[in-house]
Image (tube, rainbow, N blue to C red):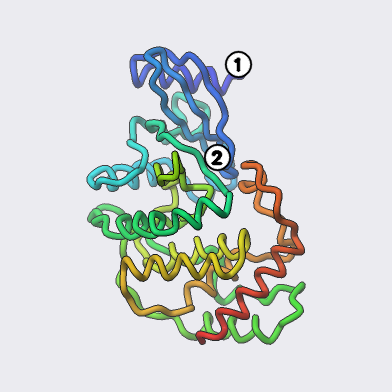
């Protein structure tokens, strides 16, 4: 057992009064070390440790942020982890750490899961958006890349579509009523068990923001994983739950937030065994999606 795990397990035992029998790393997370811990009473808990020093330098309150998110959600009947303990300043664990209960199910990337479960995915997101925003919850939505720094990707074969889309997001920011959003709602953060959506995890980026930001982020993932039709199915399912005026703004901004010059396949997908993608296929699907979204400008 390495030193970090030993300190982590000792901290868990101190917090819960139960012995950790086995610790196993969980796949799918690329920004944190996520571990499953089997306890001596056969119950399970999950820990997150922030090991990325650059991320911590930018956001030193990451563990405090997720703790506040989980506590806000605990007042609602939602399939999310229950907060158990935090060592936000790494006083006991060598790295900022958060402890939560384990949720049954696992992330699945087979298209058939989402074809059958799209309504569940939309209903759950709408319920998340109905979570009351605590008065002491300060985190607010911002694009990952400053809007004026967004660029047309150098690999495009359709620069006119991208230029049109870029001009739109840089000059047409819509008004919105903020709601409680996940901010990273996509397949690797969704758990399924026996065909039912059993959990939504990774609440470290939750904030006040536009509901359509969550929809857009998930749609971008769907468009790259499976194509435009799946992305469109999710939008229709969400708007059926929450009828509202649609603008392509957040979808287009999400694409620009996602694309880069390399377009390497997301590590979280490959960690879960999804090998259907290549950089060239992702570029092609991004082109298709931008072309499709430009119809609505």
Kindly indicate whether the residue at mark 1 contacts the one at mark 2 (C-beta within 8 angstroms): no
Q: Is 181 on the left-hand or right-hand side of 224?
A: left
Q: Nearer the viewer, residue 101 or 57?
A: 101
Q: Residues within 10 Å of mark 1 (few under 14, many from 20)?
A: few
Res 163 quadrant in image: bottom right
Res 292 quadrant in image: bottom right
Residue 32, label in figure? 2
Q: Is 158 on the left-hand or right-hand side of 245?
A: right
Q: Residues within 10 Å of mark 2 (few under 14, many from 20)?
A: some
Task: Specify whether residue 53 is in view.
Answer: no
Q: Is 111 on the left-hand or right-hand side of 128?
A: right
Q: Residue at horizontal 50%, vertical 57%?
A: 115
x and y percent of residue 184 in the render?
48, 55
Q: Residue at horizontal 38%, vertical 61%?
A: 140
Q: Is 234 on the left-hand or right-hand side of 267?
A: left
Q: Considering the numbered disc 1 on the image, is that residue within a helix, a strand or a loop? A: loop
Q: Residue at horizontal 65%, vertical 70%?
A: 286
x and y percent of residue 100 in the render?
38, 33
Res 64 quadrant in image: top left
Task: Specify whether residue 161 is in view.
Answer: yes
Separation of residues labelled 2 and 1 (CA atoms)? 19 Å
x and y percent of residue 103 in the render?
40, 35
Q: Nearer the viewer, residue 266 or 3?
A: 266
**Quadrant (top left/top right/bottom left/bottom right) for the N terminus:** top right
x and y percent of residue 116 in the render?
47, 54
Which residue in the structure is indicated by mark 1?
1
Q: Residue at horizontal 42%, vertical 17%?
A: 39
The mark that comes first in sequence, 2 or 1, is: 1
């Amino acid at each position: 057992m390495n030193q970090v795990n030993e300190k982590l397990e000792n901290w868990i035992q101190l917090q819960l009064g139960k012995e950790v029998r086995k610790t196993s790393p969980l796949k799918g997370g690329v920004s944190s070390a996520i571990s499953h811990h089997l306890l001596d009473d056969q119950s399970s808990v999950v820990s997150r440790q922030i090991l990325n020093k650059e991320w911590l330098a930018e956001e030193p309150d990451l563990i405090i942020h997720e703790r506040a998110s989980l506590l806000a959600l605990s007042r609602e009947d939602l399939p999310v982890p229950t907060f158990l303990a935090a060592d936000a300043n790494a006083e006991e664990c060598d790295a900022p750490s958060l402890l939560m209960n384990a949720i049954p199910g696992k992330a699945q990337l087979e298209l058939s899961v989402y074809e059958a479960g799209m309504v569940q995915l939309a209903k759950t997101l709408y319920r998340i958006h109905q979570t009351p925003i605590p008065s002491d919850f300060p985190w607010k939505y911002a694009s990952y890349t400053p809007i004026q720094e967004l660029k047309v990707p150098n690999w495009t074969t359709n620069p006119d579509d991208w230029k049109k889309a870029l001009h739109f997001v840089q000059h047409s920011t819509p008004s919105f009523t903020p709601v409680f959003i996940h901010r990273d709602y996509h397949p690797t953060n969704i758990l399924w068990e026996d065909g039912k959506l059993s959990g939504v995890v990774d609440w470290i980026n939750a904030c006040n923001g536009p509901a359509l930001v969550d929809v857009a982020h998930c749609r971008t993932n769907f468009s790259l994983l499976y194509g435009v039709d799946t992305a469109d199915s999710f939008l229709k399912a969400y708007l059926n739950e929450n009828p509202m005026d649609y603008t392509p703004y957040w979808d287009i901004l999400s694409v620009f937030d996602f694309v880069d010059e390399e377009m390497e396949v997301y590590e979280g997908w490959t960690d879960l065994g999804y090998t259907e993608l290549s950089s060239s296929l992702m570029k092609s699907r991004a082109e298709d999606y931008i072309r499709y979204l430009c119809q609505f400008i």
